[in-house]
Image (spheres, rainbow, N blue to C red):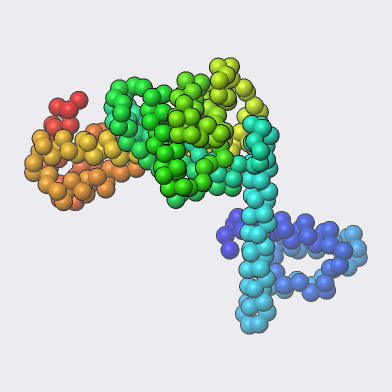
Amino acid sequence: MDAEDSEILGAFFRDYYLNAALVPPLIFVPADIQEETVAVMDVLQEKTGFRPKLKSPRGGDKRSLLKIAEKNAELGLTERLLATHYRDQTASLKEIQEMFSLEHPPHIIECYDISHFQGSEPVASGVMFVEGKPFKQGYRKYNIRGYKGINDPGMIHEVISRRLQRIVNEDSVFPDLIVIDGGPTQLAKACEAAVEAGAERIPMIGLAKKREEIYFPGDNEPFIFDMNSSGMKLLRHLRDEAHRFGVSHHRSRRNKETMRALIQGVPDIGFKRSKLLLQHFSGEKKIEDATKEELLAVSGIGENLAEKILRQLQKKE
């Protein structure tokens, strides 16, 4: 048992037995918390004149029973935490229903975000929360087809059009709420796409990053809700998850484009090493920011090849 577990168990022992209506004459406790339990027994004796015996079994049946009790306590705590989390999520969804005058708490919420670097390699991300929790099977990545340069409203229109058309084509369930990462311009284009898809009844809002303001369709003035309320916390979680997912997709796409240019400029890399490079520079890393040491850490890349890659990356800049 680690120090944190010992502290938690000791606190539980103190709170439970100092307030218990009935205290047994013999209590089995783990050896890790014996010091804490002795102090509790001292207080209990002062209050009641009764002092239970404490034992810490080292083996045998008593030790097995103690292990079972520890496991039961762990399962009980897990169940209580899950129940508390469920109540919190339910309260958040109920609050969102009231904030946006929805017919019922939103069981399915989707959020969309645009990611690009000065207009290059634009992508979009869509995340789905079901009953207030991320539903990874409903996450979607989009490569923007119809726009180049910086045009976030147009890109949002394209993505929402594609998403809603797919729902219609597959006869799937529409979300109860769509959140757009952006202000009134982006929201207006998303609503326009919904009307074109015959899905204008889907509630939509915009959530702007700068001041965490909420925009409603057709209204250029933002609404500001309590940022610390459970509903706003859930909406920010949703928006931040869409942003994280989109940035990850954008970085992956840029890495692939950088790799294509590298292979053209440095044919020695080859297919196998290009795959290893992409694996190594996944997640937070970008190939274009690679150092010599990072390149040398990739299997099959030596001093000469690393220097060629760096020279090619410098040309790209």
* Residue in front for this viewpoint, 74 or 240: 240
* Residue in front for this viewpoint, 273 or 45: 273
Residue at image position (45%, 34%) is 197
Q: Is residue 205 left or right of residue 68?
A: left
x and y percentages locating residue 147 in the rendered image: 31, 26
* Residue in front for this viewpoint, 298 or 26: 298
Task: Say whether residue 248 is visible.
Answer: no
Q: Is residue 285 left or right of residue 17?
A: left
x and y percentages locating residue 101 in the rendered image: 66, 32
Task: Say whether residue 263 is visible.
Answer: yes
Figure quadrant of residue 193: top left
Q: Is residue 316 left or right of residue 193?
A: left
> Looking at the image, how many numbered discs can be counted on the residues?
0
* Residue in front for this viewpoint, 98 or 2: 98
x and y percentages locating residue 57 in the rendered image: 67, 76
Q: Pick the quarter of the image with the C terminus.
A: top left
Residue at image position (65%, 59%) is 79
Residue at image position (76%, 63%) is 38
x and y percentages locating residue 168 in the rendered image: 45, 42
- In this rendering, the answer to whether 231 lies above or below 9 is above
Q: Pick the quarter of the image with the N terminus.
A: bottom right
Q: What residue occupies the far bottom of the structure in this picture?
A: 60
Residue at image position (37%, 41%) is 141
Q: What residue occupies the far top of the structure in this picture?
A: 221
- In this rendering, the answer to whether 67 lies above or below 317 is below
- In this rendering, the answer to whether 236 lies above or below 85 is above
